[in-house]
Image (cartoon, rainbow, N blue to C red):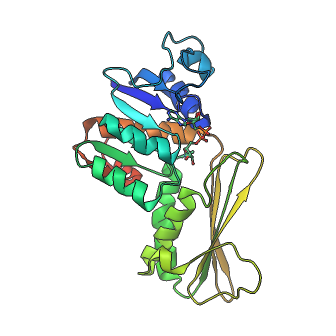
């Protein structure tokens, strides 16, 4: 049994993780942190996520004995919450280099899983994309992602992960070859990777990586059909973090660990 505190408990992902935690017999929901000053402070966490009364109030700070923090907020809030010095699973995306460096620093004293995508499918796809990029060396790579209209950051953290998987298969750095959208006169340069973000409606998350050859094209697609897939991945990562030594871990570490 592990204890988990959901940070960003009133958000789309936070509510999904609270619901999954309340339904998982191996997880005890210790608390839920919502944005300071928000009308959700004091709300029942079960009612907030549609799971029925849980007898636990949403708070501005983690409770004592918070267990592992599961964070789905904003990059600014995520970095602020590192000061709690608690084991954490960070699902928040759009962290700058500097914010990521702060996470790395905090992970020297506590275990932190930093995973821009918690789904098992996407994480398996990374290996496939790396191999395709390596084996289909001369093919042009394009990445297209789609998300709901409320997503803040673009391109998605997952699109960047997929881009890094492709460049690692080719011995390149994404920073050197990525082109974000195209406009005006912008012919394709040899080796560039185009990354394109669509935003609209209620799309949970879709990623396509396309390899265009002279006489064929290969496309890998992942569609998240429900946020539940991310929530279950986050709880799996929390189980991993609860038992891990201090350090910075990825979802690949979580999925390759036993149990
Ligand atoms: P959302 O806007 O619905 O929820 C974010 C919540 O964080 C809001 O309720 C907001 O009030 C709250 N918040 C902001 N500052 C806070 C603070 N200081 N303390 C506590 N709560 C605070 O967004 P969302 O769709 O739930 O996504 C959240 C993040 O998770 C985004 O970065 C998104 O890209 C990412 N995400 C990651 C995965 C994954 O698998 N890693 C999956 C989906 C979304």
Closest to the observer, 234 or 7:
7
Q: Position of residue 117 (x, y in %)?
A: 51, 51
Closest to the observer, 166 or 148:
148
Q: Is residue 86 visible?
A: no
Closest to the observer, 247 or 1:
247
* Residue depicted at 38% across the width and 54% down the height: 252
Give the vertical position of 23 relative to 174 (above or below).
above
Image quarter for ligand 1: top right
Closest to the observer, 190 or 136:
190
Give the vertical position of 20 relative to 46 (above or below).
below
Q: Position of residue 200 (x, y in %)?
A: 76, 51
* Residue depicted at 77% across the width and 82% down the height: 184
- Looking at the rendered image, the quarter that the N terminus falls into is top left
Q: Position of residue 14 (x, y in %)?
A: 54, 33
* Residue depicted at 25% across the width and 37% down the height: 243
Residue 134 shown left or right of residue 106 in the figure: right
Q: How many discs appear? A: 0
Residue 190 shown left or right of residue 237 in the figure: right
Give the vertical position of 131 relative to 235 (above or below).
below
Q: Is residue 23 visible?
A: yes
Q: Position of residue 158 (x, y in %)?
A: 54, 58
Quarter location, residue 29: top left
- Looking at the rendered image, the quarter that the C terminus falls into is top left
């Amino acid at each position: 049994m592990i204890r988990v505190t959901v940070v960003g408990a009133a958000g789309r992902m936070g509510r999904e993780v609270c619901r999954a935690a309340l339904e998982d017999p191996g997880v005890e929901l210790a608390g839920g942190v919502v944005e300071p000053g928000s009308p959700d402070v004091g709300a029942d966490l079960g009612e907030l996520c549609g799971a029925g009364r849980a007898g636990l109030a949403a708070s501005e700070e983690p409770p004592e004995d918070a267990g592992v923090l599961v964070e789905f907020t904003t990059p600014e809030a995520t970095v602020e919450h590192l000061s709690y010095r608690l084991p954490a699973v960070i699902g928040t995306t759009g962290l700058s280099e500097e914010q990521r460096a702060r996470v790395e620093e905090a992970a020297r004293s506590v275990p932190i899983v930093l995973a821009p995508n918690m789904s098992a499918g996407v994480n398996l796809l990374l290996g496939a994309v790396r191999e395709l990029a390596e084996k289909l060396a001369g093919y042009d790579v394009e990445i297209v992602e789609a998300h709901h209209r409320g997503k803040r950051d673009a391109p998605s953290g997952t699109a960047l992960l997929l881009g890094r998987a492709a460049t690692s298969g080719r011995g390149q750095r994404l920073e050197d070859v990525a082109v974000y959208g195209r406009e005006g006169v912008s012919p394709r340069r040899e080796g560039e990777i185009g990354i394109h973000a669509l935003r609209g409606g209620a799309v949970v998350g879709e990623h396509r990586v396309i390899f265009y050859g002279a006489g064929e094209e290969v496309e890998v697609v992942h569609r998240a059909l429900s946020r539940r897939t991310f929530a279950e991945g986050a709880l799996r990562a929390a189980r991993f973090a609860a038992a891990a030594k201090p350090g910075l871990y990825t979802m690949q570490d979580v999925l390759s660990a036993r149990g």
